[in-house]
Every structure is written in C-alpha cells, then in structure tokens.
C-alpha cells in the first residue's frame, strides 16, 4: 500500500526478489528437488562459513539446494523424459522405491540397471549454459578456495585412499579440471601426477602435481598425453561444466592404461551460470545417470558404478562418485 512520508523520513520497506547469479566468488545452486507431483528448485543462502578465502579477498558466498532428488514413478526423471528416452532409460520403468532394501544405496542402484538408450541422448540444448562467454575470462582470476565443505573433502580423500594403487614410482595419475588442490591423500607419492586446468596460477600452487597443462576442454577437449599413460584419472566437482563431455571421456579412456580407473566426483554445488543445462535442470540421482551415460557412450569402459560417499547426509555437502575401468581387451 502507498505509504505517506516526508522527504526526510524513513523509506518504506520493499519486498525484493533475489536474483541468483555466479560472480567470481559465488558458488551457485545446482540441483533440482523432484517429487512425484512436481519439480521445484529451492535456493537458500547457506548459513555455513565460506570454505575458502580468495587470496585475501572476501569469503566465498556459498549457495546450497535441497540435498537430492528422487525419481518420479515409474522410475524416470520428468526432466530426462523430455529428451525422448523415457522410462526405459532407467531399466524399463522399474520403480526402485517399491523394493526397499536394508542399507540400500539408491545412487548405486541407478547404474545397476540404467537402461541407456540406443543413441547418445544429449545435444546442444542439454549442453547449453546461461553464460556462454569464454571460460578463460571466467577463470582468469585465481580462486584459492574450496567449493565443497571440509567434511565432503574428507570423504573424497578417504575414497581416494581406498581406490588409488599403492604409492609407487611406477604409478601415474591425471587430475582433469585441476586447481590449486586435488584432495588426494596426504603424503601420497606417484612417479607422475599431472593436472589439466584453466588457471596457471592455481596449478602452480598445487603441491602434488609433477606437471600441468593449461587448457579449456570446452574449446579443445584433448589431452597432451600419450595413449595408455595413467593408472587413474580423477575429476572433482567439475564434470557439470563440460560442454563436450563425450569427447573428454573418450580422451580419458585413451590415456588410461588398460584396467585403469576413472573417478568422477561431484556434489550439489557449482557456478550455476557455467554448468550445463541438463545438470542444473536435474537432481543428484539424475546426475549419477548422466555421468554414467558419458562413460557408456564414450566407449572403451566397463559398465560404470556409483557410490554415495556423503559424510553426513542433510548436514554437510553431499558427495558422490561415478567410476569406470578401462577395458583390458
């Protein structure tokens, strides 16, 4: 209602719509909460402290969403159904919720019977982003921050501890979309630990890397390494930014040694204007299927598997891994 006041009086209070966008220091919402009746996205400012400080500047403003989505009956995401694959994408309409098991991991179940379609289901529309400007511009300033909380980092490091081969001069590891920190186990040693990333200042600060390459994989999705070089390839909370994921996954397969392991890990936090549309429009369970599809359609991998390694569901950042081994023959 109109509020009478003189020129020197207090201004009337206004309701303001908050626009969420990703600045150089903002981490944005990535996930969609899906229910049987509707799909909603909830965004709230996190009350947690920032997980990092950008070289003496202000703390990173974290944004979070509801932790995970759930498949709508009969087992397929409404969003994924719109790209034409239908419920067959998730095993011919099987409703996992109707067969509860003790200590079941619904994220692992997604890829046990994924029902991938005959053809790769993602095109330009699904790989589009709100901000299509050069990634080199977006990442031109170094961010010496962590984009997931300490508990999620700890869970990922523990997963690496049980997944990496024993430390040896014969071991080679590649960190794709690397930064100033890789979250590898403290003191882990290998003969070669390479990194590909967007910002050279960040890569120079990463103490575990023996060498690095600066490359925008959305412009040039190739790796400067020979075939069959690495025992393990990792990618941490960055798979959602890849606009050419199939080409990147083919490179991952090429540089892995036969029997080597690829580990893609992600949470529900990101820069939303740089994440691809299919990621921001779907939820955590769907993300597992999407990454599994990248492996499947790239070829050269054994069937992918997923695991929920979230340290404290609902109270800390969630953490998921989708892995696959390179075929040996």
Image (cartoon, rainbow, N blue to C red):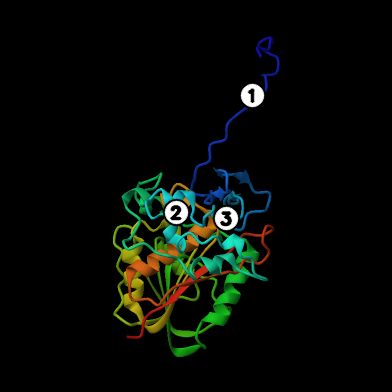
What separation in Å lies between label 2 and label 3 (alpha carbons)?
37 Å
305 sits to left or right of 221:
right
Residue 202 placed where, x, y %? 46, 64
The label on residue 70 is: 3
What separation in Å lies between label 2 and label 1 (alpha carbons)?
35 Å
Give the SS element for disc 1.
loop
The label on residue 75 is: none
Residue 22 placed where, x, y %? 49, 46
Number of the front mark, 3 or 1: 3
Residue holding disc 1: 14
Residue 147 placed where, x, y %? 55, 58
Residue 154 placed where, x, y %? 62, 70
Label 2 crowd bin: few (<14), some (14–19), many (20+), radius 10 Å = some
Label 1 crowd bin: few (<14), some (14–19), many (20+), radius 10 Å = few
Give the SS element for disc 3.
loop
User: From where the camera sits, is residue 239 visible?
Assistant: no
Number of the front mark, 2 or 1: 1
Q: Viewer-proximal residue, 275 or 39?
A: 39
Does residue 6 sit above or below 307 in this rendering? above
Does residue 152 sit above or below 80 in this rendering? below
Residue holding disc 2: 141
Q: Quadrant of the N terminus?
A: top right
Q: Viewer-proximal residue, 174 or 213?
A: 174
318 sits to left or right of 86:
right
Q: Viewer-proximal residue, 240 or 226?
A: 240
Of the image marks 2 and 3, the number of the one nearer the N terminus: 3
Of the image marks 2 and 1, the number of the one nearer the N terminus: 1
């Amino acid at each position: 209602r109109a509020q009478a006041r003189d020129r020197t009086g207090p201004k009337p209070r206004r309701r303001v719509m908050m626009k969420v966008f990703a600045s150089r220091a903002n981490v944005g919402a990535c996930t969609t909460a899906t229910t049987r009746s509707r799909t909603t996205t909830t965004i709230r400012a996190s009350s947690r402290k920032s997980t990092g400080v950008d070289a003496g500047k202000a703390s990173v403003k974290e944004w979070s969403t509801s932790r995970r989505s759930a498949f709508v009956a009969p087992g397929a995401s409404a969003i994924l159904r719109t790209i034409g694959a239908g419920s067959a994408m998730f095993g011919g309409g099987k409703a996992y919720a109707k067969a509860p098991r003790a200590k079941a991991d619904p994220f692992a179940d997604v890829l046990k019977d994924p029902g991938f379609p005959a053809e790769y289901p993602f095109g330009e529309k699904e790989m589009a982003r709100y901000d299509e400007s050069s990634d080199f511009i977006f990442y031109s300033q170094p961010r010496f921050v962590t984009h997931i909380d300490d508990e999620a980092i700890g869970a990922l490091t523990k997963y690496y501890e049980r997944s990496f081969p024993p430390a040896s001069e014969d071991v080679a590891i590649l960190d794709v979309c690397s930064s100033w920190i890789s979250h590898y186990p403290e003191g882990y040693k290998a003969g070669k630990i390479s990194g590909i990333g967007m910002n050279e200042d960040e890569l120079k600060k990463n103490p575990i890397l023996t060498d690095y390459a600066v490359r925008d994989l959305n412009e040039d999705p190739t790796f400067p390494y020979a075939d069959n070089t690495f025992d393990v390839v990792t990618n941490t909370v960055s798979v959602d930014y890849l606009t050419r994921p199939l080409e990147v996954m083919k490179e991952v397969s090429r540089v892995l040694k036969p029997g080597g392991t690829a580990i893609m890990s992600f949470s529900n936090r990101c820069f939303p204007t740089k994440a691809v549309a299919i990621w921001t429009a779907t939820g955590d369970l769907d993300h597992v299927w999407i990454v599994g599809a990248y492996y499947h359609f790239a070829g050269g991998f054994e069937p992918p598997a997923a695991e929920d390694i979230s340290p404290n569901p609902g109270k800390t950042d969630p953490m998921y891994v989708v892995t696959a081994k390179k075929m040996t023959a």
